Amino acid sequence: MSNRIGIVGVGRMGANMARHLKLDCGYDVSAIYDINREAATSLATELDGAAYDSLAAVTANSDVILTVVTDDAAMRSIFLEGDDNLLSGAEAKCFINCATLSPAIHREVATAATAAGAQTLEGCMASSISHAREGNLYLMVSGDAAAFESQLPLLKDLSINLRFIEGGAGRASEVKALVNMVMNINTAGLAEGLGLAQSLGHDLEMICEVFAQTGANSRVLETDSEDMIARDHECWFSAAHAAKDSGIAQALAHEQGVSLPLNDATKGQYDKMTAEGLGELDKSGIAELTFPGRHGSS
């Protein structure tokens, strides 16, 4: 376990991945970077690491760098723009990029990393904050096959299960887009079902019990129904991120000439939440648009 680990992006997921690797697994989390300098410094103090204000310094002081950034623009800025980026002095380094981004940016970064003598993997996560802290992520991995084999112990320490997806850079992010597209559609559908049930005067606990025993059952019924009913939208996966991820699937569908009307409608709902100031609510907050008497509903 001699590899030094760098972390770029220490929001909810990145910070808890770092905590797990350091505190539970004993890795040397040597270099931390975030545009929020206070967050980076605080985490570095907690984990006995160093917070850097230079991306090149993170690469210089790490062997493996995990990135967890918000969107394609952020990914491009840390790898491909300016004199200070992660690919400066990156020969023989390995980058594991964990955020949900477009397949195109993953391919662009992989090409640039190869030219710099570095390896890249996508480690797309289908899990929540608690899973990151506990090392129980589900990872969809693609990219350099040799890098996958060499980093498998680290990937296993981060995850309870993982799947390597053949086909090179971008393939795991395609699968992650499909996962989040279907999850978001299911969440929107549940919110509409429960909203209509409430308007009809039904007991919502009874409705959830019936849903669970029928074809209306779903994973989001387990994770989101109580929060929708109680209006408890503490953020585990934000509406703004749901809109972004449904948009990634929408763009892929347009490229392939495939019609996805349910995804289009779901993205419209999450876009509406974001436009009306609800984007930082959990995705369960879509119920605020469907339950009678709530935000934006009649």
Image: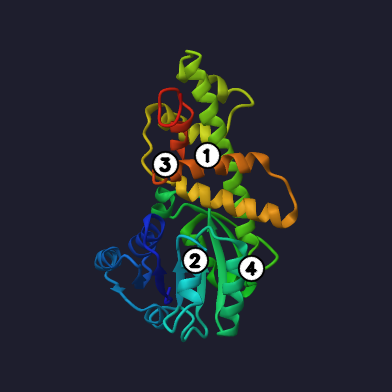
Determine whether 22 is above or below 241 in the image: below
Marks 3 and 4, how far apart at CA: 36 Å
Q: Amino acid at mark 3?
A: Glu
Question: Which of the pair 69/208 is nearer the observer?
Answer: 69
Q: Which mark is residue 169?
A: 4
Marks 2 and 3, how far apart at CA: 23 Å
Q: Residues within 10 Å of mark 3 (few under 14, many from 20)?
A: few
Report the residue marked by disc 1: 269
Determine whether 210 is above or below 63 in the image: above
Q: Which mark is residue 276?
A: 3
Marks 2 and 1, how far apart at CA: 23 Å
Q: Is residue 252 visible?
A: yes
Lower sequence index among marks 2 and 3: 2
Question: Which of the pair 69/127 is nearer the observer?
Answer: 69
Marks 3 and 1, how far apart at CA: 11 Å
- Judged by depth in the image, the label closer to the viewer, 1 or 4, is 1
- Judged by depth in the image, the label closer to the viewer, 3 or 4, is 3
Q: Residues within 10 Å of mark 1 (few under 14, many from 20)?
A: some
Lower sequence index among marks 2 and 1: 2
Q: Which mark is residue 73?
A: 2
Lower sequence index among marks 1 and 4: 4
In the picture provided, is 41 more to the left or to the right than 240? left
Lower sequence index among marks 3 and 1: 1
Residue occupying the far top of the picture: 201
Q: Residues within 10 Å of mark 2 (few under 14, many from 20)?
A: few
| Element at label 2 | helix
Please state the horizontal and vertical placement of residue 177, each as a whole percent of the image: 60, 53
Please state the horizontal and vertical placement of residue 129, each as a whole percent of the image: 41, 50
- Please identify the quarter of the rendering in which residue 292 is found: top left
